[in-house]
Image (spheres, rainbow, N blue to C red):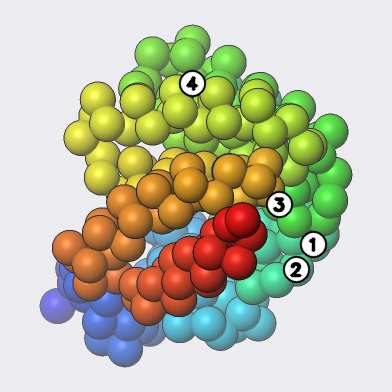
Amino acid sequence: MNPYQLMQKGNGAFSQKDYAQALLCYSKALEGIRSDDSPLADLYGNIGNVYAATGKIEEAVGAYKEALAILRRLEDYDRLGMTYANIGNLYTDHGDPKQGIDYYMQGVLLLERSRQGEALVVLYGNLTLAQIQVGDSTKALEYAEKAITLACELSRPQLIAEATHRLAKAHGASGNLQDALRVSESAFALFRRLKDESGCAGARYHQVALHEQAGDLDAAIRLLKEVVAFDERYQLPKLEENKRRLKRLEAKKTASSP
């Protein structure tokens, strides 16, 4: 099997979450592809994705940086920007949003330069969430607005729905509860139109927090029941956690009743 076939086999294993097999295929492919820079950069990126999926941060960053070095030589700004975004995702997802933002910003500069619209919408959305994590609601709103503006320009319904959901989160982080609820309801309507059940559940889950913060426990409980029903239907990992939260909200309501 030649290295390109091994890469394809590795991609198939990765899509099936067989990360050990994917890494084995990629490692074997690496031995025979070192003289071809473009696929070599992809290969290092794929290896980084495997390490990222298995929680091996240092190894993932190392592989991504190998890809960055090759992409700089090739002056491939699109893939360079996306690789910076991948590193930003890695750090942010593992509790270091400040460092994640540093990599996101490098990705933004490159992707704006190459006008990669869809990738930029996603990156602006990730920046929104990272800025929320570090407590900068002003910048979170700025990037959320950029994301939704660009998504609308591209006329991509799924991107618009996801960007609307991020904008609701940014409003919520800013303390603008009414704006957050209004925008979140718009996101829910968009997800429902797309028949995106996961998106609908995510919007409802955010609304639970907003209603609880506003002191409307009846609304929070009603919406959390929808989320729990979704979790039960697909046996999602957060089912028991959300059931416990529902019980806490119901107990809180009972305690506050006259």
Which residue lies under the disc numbered 1?
Answer: 99
User: Can you say whether 68 is above or below 175 in the image?
Assistant: below
Q: Distance between the residues labelled 1 and 4?
A: 26 Å
Between residue 33 and residue 235, name the one nearer to us: 235
Considering only order in the chain, which callout, 3 or 1, is on the residue closer to the N terminus?
A: 1
Which residue lies under the disc numbered 3?
Answer: 130
Which residue lies under the disc numbered 4?
Answer: 151
Counting other residues with Cα less than 10 Å from the Cα at mark 1, is it few (<14), some (14-19), or many (20 or more)? some
Considering only order in the chain, which callout, 2 or 3, is on the residue closer to the N terminus?
A: 2
Counting other residues with Cα less than 10 Å from the Cα at mark 3, is it few (<14), some (14-19), or many (20 or more)? many
Q: How far apart are marks 3 and 2 (CA)?
A: 9 Å
Q: Where is residue 170 in the image (x, y as percent from the top left)?
A: 68, 37
Q: Are marks 1 and 2 in contact (CB under 8 Å)?
A: yes
Residue at the image position 49 percent from the left and 21 percent from the top = 151
Counting other residues with Cα less than 10 Å from the Cα at mark 4, is it few (<14), some (14-19), or many (20 or more)? many
Q: Where is residue 47 in the image (x, y as percent from the top left)?
A: 45, 74
| Viewer-side label of 1, 3 | 3
Q: Are marks 1 and 4 in contact (CB under 8 Å)?
A: no
